[in-house]
Amino acid sequence: MPITITAFERSPDGGKGLARDTRVRWALEEVGQPYEVRLLSFGAMKEPAHLELHPFGQIPTYEEGDLALFETGAIVLHIAQRYAGLLPADDNARARAIAWMFAAVNTVEPPILEFQNAKLFERDKSWSEERLPLVLDRLRKPLDRLAARLGSADWLEGAFSAGDLMMVSVLLRLKPSGFINEFPNLAAYLARGEARPAYQRAFAAQLAINTGTPPSG
Ligand code: GTB
């Protein structure tokens, strides 16, 4: 069954891989499934045809036969459950990997988004400077805990899993600012994720769209 995802026609990050289609591409590359991409303008995302697929008018979406999905957590979980390669066979280990996926989107991603909003959109507000230490505190707490749990391990629960894929994808947003370097083992974890051939292919594919150059190789 062919798989089609949606992505920005032109990502605001110019191809740094920070838009959320990258994590879906990465998951599909990890499990070796080919996919097609339908590119959308910001206007098209709010049209009825896309709202039918994505109630919040966003990217990415995922279509496969009769199935249409939105939310990257649900999409990556679906891919990991349908195709081998991203979840352990043992039931308990599988549940733990899924727990890390939820931790990524539910515990770690929100304070990262809050930090980015504070830096990008609130700097001109009279209260911005006073609020920033609170935002940073809320961000450092889960990152401190995550760094302590990861320790010197390569991945969160033994072998690389969908939990790592989501966690690395979420942490990638802290790379451009250099904030991730406050946590050297998380920075190394990020680099390990980015070094995976499947990530490299996913990154190159979204970069090609945003720079208009076909991926090489
Ligand atoms: N919770 C949803 C999920 O995980 O799927 C969130 C989806 C989402 O936020 N999609 C964004 C979107 O469609 C793109 S990824 N935005 C358009 C809109 O809401 O109208 C967020 C994003 C956008 C741009 C950058 N960037 O340029 O650095 C990074 C991340």
Image (tube, rainbow, N blue to C red):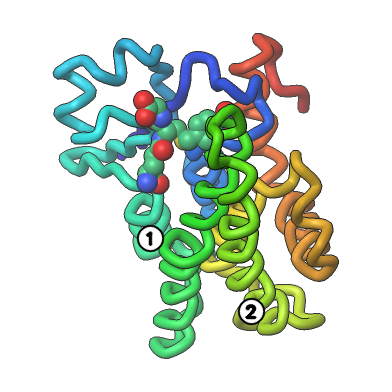
Nearest to viewer (mark 1 / mark 2)? 2
Q: Up-down: is 210 above or below 89?
A: above
Q: Nearer the viewer, residue 198 or 113?
A: 113
Marks 1 and 2 sit apart, C-alpha to C-alpha, by 24 Å
* Quarter of the render that holds ligand 1: top left
Whichever of labels 1 and 2 marks the residue nearer the N terminus, that label is: 1
Determine the image quadrant of residue 135. bottom right
Callout 1: SS: helix
Q: Position of residue 2 (x, y in %)?
A: 34, 35
What label sits on residue 145 in the rendered view?
A: 2
> Looking at the rendering, in which quadrant would you find the C terminus?
top right
Q: Is residue 18 left or right of residue 217?
A: left
Secondary structure under the numbered disc 2 in the rendered image: helix
Residue 104, compared with residue 64, is above or below; it is below
What residue does disc 1 label? 77
Q: Which mark is residue 17?
A: none
Query: Could you tell me residue 65's position as x and y percent?
Result: 22, 38
The residue carrying mark 1 has its beta carbon less than 8 Å from ligand 1: no
Classify the position of the N terminus by image quarter.
top left
| Neighbours of disc 2 within 10 Å: few (<14), some (14-19), many (20+) | few
